[in-house]
Amino acid sequence: QVQLVESGGGLVQAGGSLRLSCAVSGGTFRSFTMGWFRQAPEKEREFVGRISQSGISTYYADSVKGRFTISRTNAKNTVYLQMNSLKPEDTAVYYCAADRDGNDYDYWGQGTQVTVSS
């Protein structure tokens, strides 16, 4: 069974940085496209970005482009979300997800809270 566990969330002041990690077990990590999503209170889940199986290709939502960076270490079965220049509107629960076949995200983590104070 594939499991995803996020870590690294917390409280940070506006303008600060955080790095989230997502450790994946139980599957062939290097075959997964990995994505990050977030959900703020009373809002729908929002796509943040994704990274290809090899890590060469990334894609970001306009709201985070230039501030967030996704990377992965296949040898450690881990994907990262580096968040810089954080804004209060980045406050949300952040989730990582794994796409095994290019159709949809099949596996999800439990989420980690990120709170940005003004």
Image (cartoon, helix red, strand yellow):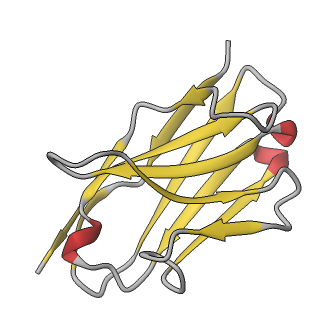
Could you tell me if residue 114 is visible in this image?
no
- Residue 112 screen position, x and y as percent: 35, 45
Measured as percent of width and height from the top left, residue 49 is found at 58, 61
Is 72 situated left or right of 31 in this image? left
Question: Is 57 on the left-hand or right-hand side of 83?
Answer: right
Quadrant position of residue 32? top right
The quadrant in which residue 104 appears is top right
Residue placed farthest to the left in the image?
A: 118
* x and y percentages locating residue 37 in the rendered image: 46, 50
Classify the position of the N terminus by image quarter.
top right
Q: Residue at x 58, y 69 (%)?
A: 60
Query: Can I make out residue 58 in this image?
Result: yes
Relative to 71, is 54 above or below? above
Percent position (x, y) of residue 43? 22, 49
Which residue does the image show at 78% across and 31% down from the upper left?
A: 100
Quadrant housing the C terminus? bottom left
State the residue in front, 6 or 97.
Answer: 97
